[in-house]
Image (cartoon, helix red, strand yellow):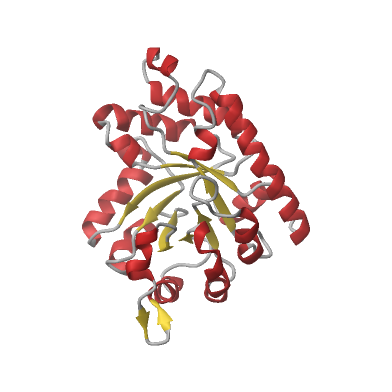
Amino acid sequence: MNRQQLIEQIKKKKSFLCIGLDTDIELIPRFLLDFPDPVLEFNKRIIDSTYDLCVAYKPNSAFYESRGIAGWQSLIQTSQYIPAGCLRLIDAKRGDIGNTSAMYAKAFFDEKSSGMNFDAITVAPYMGIESVKPFLEFEGKWVVLLVLTSNEGGKDFQFLKIGDQCLFERVIEAANGWAGNDRMMYVVGATRSEEFKAIRKLAPDHFLLVPGVGAQGGSLQEVSRYGLNKECGLLVNSSRGIIYASKENDFAERAREEALKLQQEMSILLEEKGII
């Protein structure tokens, strides 16, 4: 999915919702354990009930890797099940020296090699362009660079001063030269809404992936107030607040209810901004 296709989906669905598939086999409804692949069955039902309300799905690879071969199989089949009208974003937070990053990129982008063909991947920038470039060498794929995260420990390094700038600002400046806004997104936590003004000065046209709305306490209104641009420019992620809205047999229906609440709120915000 390229930038224009993503924008078209946002306008069509009146939504900039990304649903995180952080699927923990210990937390899903017990009746699903009777299925050959309980995690896949859970994901399929979540997707079936919400795909018309969101523009992206974001599996977190740790929840799958932790289950070994079975988990990888669930992830591969989940990636293949996500419909074409949604961005397929793998939250893997990779980033290593060049030849290693090249293998990570192949793992998540090369369907012939691994069975997975994600559109985008989260990447850690600490090792610089050498760790990012191999992902960009896959034509049409997105890098979603960690810039300003919502966790409390993010303050340990991200706000360190380098001259008159914070480290996260230097990361954006550097990364702007690595790829354009059609290939590069930035991760900005919803609990950092006060920093969106500074980020938008450095990256006015880039898409921002915003985790932390819902269970982590981030405000959609605040994020949208400072983060929306003329083409939307936001993907706001909700994971636990949607997929674990119920642990009973009605989990898919309840997930849809929670996704619909966010979609309706997003629709109003997009209208107010003149995007739809």
In the image shown, does 263 or 2 lie closer to the viewer? 263
Which residue appears at 59% of the width and 57% of the height? Answer: 234
Give the percent coordinates (x, y) of residue 152. Answer: 39, 60
Q: In the rendered view, would you say 46 is above or below 189?
A: above
- Which image quadrant for residue 165? bottom left
- Which image quadrant for residue 172? bottom left
Which residue appears at 37% of the width and 67% of the height? Answer: 155
Count of picture labels: 0
190 left or right of 144 in image: right
Q: In the rendered view, would you say 240 is above or below 122?
A: above
Query: Is residue 225 visible in this depiction of the protein?
Result: yes
103 left or right of 136 in image: left
Q: In the rendered view, would you say 50 is above or below 176?
A: above
In the image shown, does 70 or 180 lie closer to the viewer? 70
126 left or right of 198 in image: left
Which residue appears at 27% of the width and 56% of the height? Answer: 101
Give the percent coordinates (x, y) of residue 55. Answer: 59, 44
Q: In the rendered view, would you say 118 is above or below 123?
A: above
Which residue appears at 45% of the width and 21% of the height? Answer: 29
Q: Residue furthest top?
A: 34
- Which image quadrant for residue 47? top right
Query: Is residue 82 visible in this depiction of the protein?
Result: no
Give the percent coordinates (x, y) of residue 60. Answer: 39, 42
Give the percent coordinates (x, y) of residue 194. Answer: 55, 68
